[in-house]
Image (cartoon, rainbow, N blue to C red):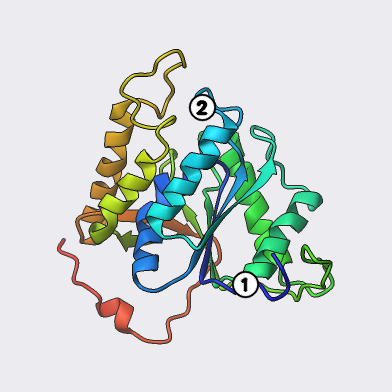
Amino acid sequence: MTSNQKSVDIVAFGAHPDDVELSAGGTIAKAVSEGKSVVLVDLTRGEMGSRGTPEIRLEEAKAAASILGASDRLNMGLPDTQVANTRENQLKVIQILRAYKPQVVFANAPIDRNPDHGHGSALIRDSFFLSGLVKIETKDEQGQHQESWRPSHLLFYMQDTVFEPDVIIDVTDHIETKEASILAHASQVNVQNPGDEPETYISSPTFFESIRARTRTYGHRGGCTHGEPFKLGRAPIMLSTLDPLFDRKIAR
């Protein structure tokens, strides 16, 4: 990441290499199809997971990013199960935000089953704000000063713990791409034959089926076939046009 790094529209953070795909993969695919540029950032290598190795998971993550059409995928290498909202880690996130200058940031939800998700969410939330402070100084990989940058929008995606969403994004036309990106994490999800490694909460085919069930549920709530739910991390959102209010009529 250099001082002349090309800016992107969206940076999507996940505590682990499959978090974004599971929760916001359809939205990422939709954004790319609309000409938006997206960078994925994994906080950890997922090395403490019961299945797979960091090396395998890295290759799976690359494949998934390619399926979604992401411009790049980074891994911060924070220790799995020990994600912490420290100043040191905040500065690492700030460097990424200032390098890519996104308008929109996605992150794990503040409360979720895996502690790393909540801790990672807090890390991104605080870094999102701090990145806009001029007196917090960071440098890029070449030692060049980075200008302050605060993105416009922060959205938390739903993973395990259910919340009342502020936004539902219609991903009907991109559900197959979302599911293909999830299946790229073959060591983790929809494992038909677990082999010598243990079965996990997300490895069974029934978990994979629940992903589609969730998009159907929130699609129904939003007035489409498949939808992904999000919570606003920075509200309110200003509308420069009323067009979104007339996007579709929801049958109730």
Pick the residue in front: 198 or 207: 198
Q: Is residue 94 left or right of residue 104?
A: right
Q: Give the camera-side residue of 89 and 68.
A: 68
Precedes in sequence: disc 1 or disc 2: 2
Count of numbered tags? 2
- Disc number lying in front (1 or 2): 2
Q: SS at mark 1?
A: loop
Image coordinates for residue 108, horizontal then vertical, percent: 53, 48
Q: Secondary structure at mark 2?
A: loop
In the picture of the structure, the residue carrying the numbered disc 2 is 52
Relative to 88, say whether 173 is above or below: below
Bin the neighbour count of mark 1 within 10 Å (Cα to Cα): few under 14, some 14-19, many 20 and up: many
Give the number of the disc on residue 101: 1
Number of residues whose C-alpha sits closer than 10 Å to that of mark 2, classed few (under 14), some (14–19) or many (20 or more): some
The kind of residue on which mark 2 rests is Gly
Image spot of residue 182 (x, y percent) = 38, 42
> Does residue 177 appear anywhere in the picture?
yes
Q: Amino acid at mark 1?
A: Lys
> With respect to residue 187, does 33 lie above or below?
below
